[in-house]
């Protein structure tokens, strides 16, 4: 599957930077941008969630007793007045 993206109104400084960096590592501008996107996506996907960080530093194994996880049930709202029509 091939996709094409056209970037319009790109800042001249940004375009020059992409060109220089691509030349520096010996790849096309297209390949350089492809790698940037891939790197950013991998970094974002590997970022820890706040709950994972919390578990890493708190809990019984670290001397912190956490309360049991509460479950909040859903009850449908009853708008009837108790009388049937």
Image (cartoon, rainbow, N blue to C red):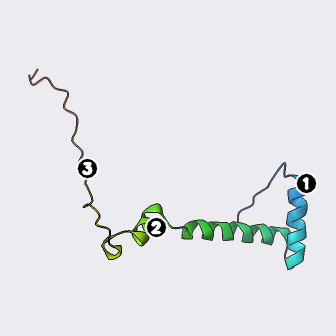
Q: Regarding mark 3 in the picture, which secondary structure is present there?
A: loop
Residue 81 visible (yes or no):
yes
Numbered disc in front, either 3 or 2:
2
Q: Residue at x 80, y 54 (%)?
A: 7
Tell me where residue 25 appears, x and y as whole percent.
Answer: 85, 78
Residue 68 falls in image quadrant = bottom left
Left or right for 38, reference 9? left
Which corner quadrant of the image does residue 22 belong to? bottom right
Of the residues under marks 1 and 3, which one precedes in the sequence? Answer: 1
Element type at mark 1? helix
The percent position of residue 79, horizontal first and vertical second, equals 20, 27
Quadrant placement of the C terminus: top left
Q: Of all residues shown, which one is farthest toward the left?
A: 83
Q: Position of residue 61 (x, y in %)?
A: 33, 76
Residue labelled with disc 1: 12
Of marks 2 and 1, which one's residue comes earlier in the chain?
1
Front residue (pair 39, 68): 68
Q: Which residue is mark 2?
A: 53
| Label 3 close to label 2 by CB (< 8 Å) | no
Q: Is residue 13 placed above or below 56 in the rendered structure?
A: above
The structure residue drawn at horizontal position 91% and vertical position 54%, both measured from the top left corner, is: 12
Crowd rating for badge 1 (residues with CA inside 10 Å; few <14, some 14–19, many 20+)? few
The residue where tag 3 is placed is 72
> Going 84% across and 52% down the picture, which residue do you hit?
10
Residue 14 image offset from top left, x and y in percent: 85, 58
Quarter of the image for residue 47 reads: bottom right
């Amino acid at each position: 599957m091939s996709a094409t993206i056209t970037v319009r109104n790109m800042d001249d400084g940004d375009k020059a930077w992409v060109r220089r960096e691509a030349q520096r590592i010996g790849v096309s501008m297209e390949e350089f941008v492809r790698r940037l996107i891939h790197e950013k996506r991998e970094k974002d996907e590997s970022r820890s969630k706040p709950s994972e960080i919390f578990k890493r530093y708190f809990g019984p194994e670290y001397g912190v007793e956490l309360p049991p996880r509460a479950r909040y049930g859903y009850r449908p709202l009853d708008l009837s007045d108790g009388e049937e029509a």
